[in-house]
Amino acid sequence: GQQLNQSPQSMFIQEGEDVSMNCTSSSIFNTWLWYKQDPGEGPVLLIALYKAGELTSNGRLTAQFGITRKDSFLNISASIPSDVGIYFCAGRSGTYKYIFGTGTRLKVLA
Amino acid sequence: DGGITQSPKYLFRKEGQNVTLSCEQNLNHDAMYWYRQDPGQGLRLIYYSQIVNDFQKGDIAEGYSVSREKKESFPLTVTSAQKNPTAFYLCASTIGSRRTQETQYFGPGTRLLVL
C-alpha cells in the first residue's frame, strides 16, 4: 500500500531548539493529520488540517497544509524533554482510507 | 470518558492458534479501522468498516478476519494463517460521514507476541 515520505527519519536536538519535519505525497489530499506516539502507546492527535494553505497552532506546535495539497509541515518551537517520541503524518483524499508516514523519531538532549 | 479501548495490552499466541483482539469505542463513530505497526514502518491497514455488518479488506488482510456486529465493537482475529503476527496492533475510528473535516482517533494498542 501507499506510504507517505516523511523526513527526517530521526533527529537529536538540544532542549530549547526549534524542530521542523515534513511529509510529501504523490497524491493530492484534502486532510492532513499530525500525531505523536510514545513507546508502547497509541498515536495521539496533535493537529488536523483541512484546507490548502491552512496554518494551525497547538501550543508550541504549528502545522501547515501545503499549497499543492501534496505536502505538510510540522514545527515544534522551544523543544522540551517531553517532546521526545515519534511523530507521524497522515493524509486522506476523500475516501475512508488514511495513508501514513513512516514517522520522525525525535530525541531531545537536556 | 469518551474514547477507544483495546484489550488486552499484551497477548501471546502459540503456533497454530487463533487469537482475538478487542476494540470498543463509545464515540458514536460509524467507521472503525485496524492497523498493524512494525518497527520503522508506517501504519498499514488490515481491515476497515464503514458501518455495522459491513467491512472491507485493507492492504494486508491475509491471515486476519474481523466482524462488525455492533457499532461500538470491531474485534480482530489473527488466524494461524498469519505467519508473522508479532506486531503492535492499533484500532482507530472516525465519524465516517465523509465530511470534509473528519479526524481519526486511535486506541492504546495491543502488542501481540508469538511463543
Image (cartoon, rainbow, N blue to C red):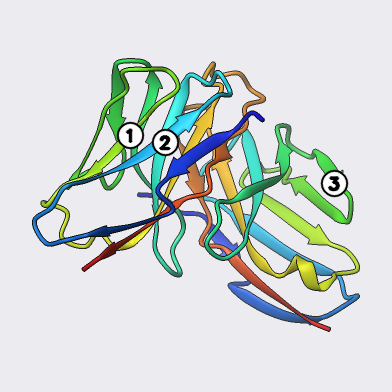
Residue A28 appears in the rendering: no
Please state the chain letter of the residue tagged with numbered disc 3 in the rendered image: A
The residue tagged with tag 3: helix, strand or loop?
A: strand
Q: Which residue is drawn at 40% across and 46% down?
A: B35
Front position in the image: A82 or B55: A82
Front position in the image: A102 or A110: A110
Label 3 Cα crowd, 10 Å radius (few <14 / some 14-19 / many 20+): few
Q: Is residue B42 above or below residue B20?
A: below
Q: Residue at x 91, y 75 (%)?
A: A16
The residue tagged with tag 2: helix, strand or loop?
A: strand
Residue under label 1: B75
Discs 2 and 1 share one subunit: yes
Residue under label 2: B23
Please state the chain letter of the residue tagged with numbered disc 2 in the rendered image: B
Quarter of the image with the C terminus of chain A in it:
bottom right
Residue under label 3: A58
Please state the chain letter of the residue tagged with numbered disc 1 in the rendered image: B
Front position in the image: A68 or B113: B113
* Amino acid tagged 2: Cys
* Amino acid tagged 1: Pro
Give the Cα separation between the discs numbered 3 and 2: 29 Å
Label 1 Cα crowd, 10 Å radius (few <14 / some 14-19 / many 20+): many
Q: Position of residue A62 (x, y in %)?
A: 83, 51
Discs 3 and 2 share one subunit: no
Q: Where is residue A31 in the image (x, y as percent from the top left)?
A: 63, 35
The residue tagged with tag 1: helix, strand or loop?
A: loop
Callouts 2 and 1 close, C-beta under 8 Å: yes
* Amino acid tagged 3: Asn
Q: Where is residue B90 in the image (x, y as percent from the top left)?
A: 44, 47
Label 2 Cα crowd, 10 Å radius (few <14 / some 14-19 / many 20+): many
Between tags 3 and 1, which lies in front? 1
Q: Which residue is drawn at 88% across and 75% down?
A: A17
